[in-house]
Amino acid sequence: MNTPSHLGECIVAASTIGSNVIIAKNRDRSYNPQVEIVRRLVDNTEVCLFHDMTTGWVEGMNEHGIGILNTALMVGFDEKEKQLVKKSGQKSQDAPRVMAALGHKDLKGAIKSAAGFDGGIKGHTIVANARQGAVIENTSRHAVSIKPLNMEDITVRTNHGHLYTDAGYTEGIKYLSSKIRKISAEKQLSAVNDYHDIARALRQPFYPKNSMLNMARDTAEMSTTSQIVLNLNTNEMLVYLFRSKIEEFHGLNNQLPEGRQSKIKVRVFWINNR
């Protein structure tokens, strides 16, 4: 019997909503992950991480208002992510790269690290603070591209190449899904005036329930398991967990030194079945 593939497809976006700079994500998995929120120090900088305990993946923000979110372009690996981790015992190679970048106090250092440390974070990566940012496109087959964000515009990346048209999905229904999800997210974000409404906007269905074209999917092959919204002005992480798509939520893992007060606010919301 063939082992089913384990897909990892997402939407990441950046925009100014009202007076707040926001980066946000729909996280899609072909498995139900175990997740936690981790507070810890990296190079004496407080970071707050969304941690997929199943594969080791992390992303999030630091006390200096720098946020990092990512979506995949390494399709060959991501389609087998969970089974490869289980077979090899080696978890996400990008997790140490994300943490190293978030350990920086200044945005320039964070962008340089995200693009270059140990080969750089793979895929489309948004690195930003409340004043400026960049979107990085990086695969093992291409030179790293770093493009400044227009903070007043809406920037969305899904699972096809932006600069490199041969990266990520390039044909078929998965390519169509990536293109349609990007267009839908841009349309939805253009109508949002309050950052608390971003997650709801990014799960608005435009197609039948089981369609791969929806921004938040619920198909036999792929489901949106969580959403992350980072407010880079207020140092706030909003996490939305889809109740039927999370194997277990392990809560807040506070690894900060005893007595240290966190500078990053976290709120977690459960989303019922769609």
Image: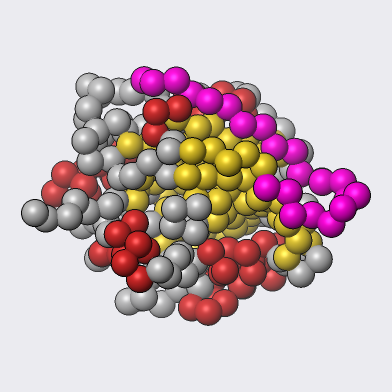
Residue 265 falls inside the magenta stretch: yes
Q: How many marks?
A: 0
Q: Say which of 111 and 227 sits in front.
A: 227
Q: Position of residue 256 (x, y in %)?
A: 79, 54
Q: Position of residue 159 (x, y in %)?
A: 33, 52
Q: Position of residue 34 (x, y in %)?
A: 47, 45
Vertical placement of 219 versus 14: above or below?
A: above
Question: Does any portion of residue 42 appear in the rendered image?
Answer: yes
Quarter occupied by residue 181: top left
Question: Does any portion of residue 24 appear in the rendered image?
Answer: no
Quarter occupied by residue 166: bottom left
Give me the residue at 36% from left, 20% from top: 274
Picture colour scheme: secondary structure
* Residue range highlighted in magenta: 253-274
Q: Quadrant of the N terminus?
A: bottom left
> Horizontal placement of 272 versus 60: left or right?
left
Q: Say which of 2 and 183 sits in front.
A: 2
Give me the residue at 43% from left, 38% from top: 247
Vertical placement of 25 versus 203: above or below?
A: below
Residue 37 falls inside the magenta stretch: no
Q: Say which of 144 and 267 sits in front.
A: 267
Quarter occupied by residue 27: top left
Q: Say which of 156 and 70 sits in front.
A: 70
> Horizontal placement of 117 versus 80: left or right?
right
Give me the residue at 41% from left, 49% from top: 157
Q: Position of residue 261 (x, y in %)?
A: 87, 46
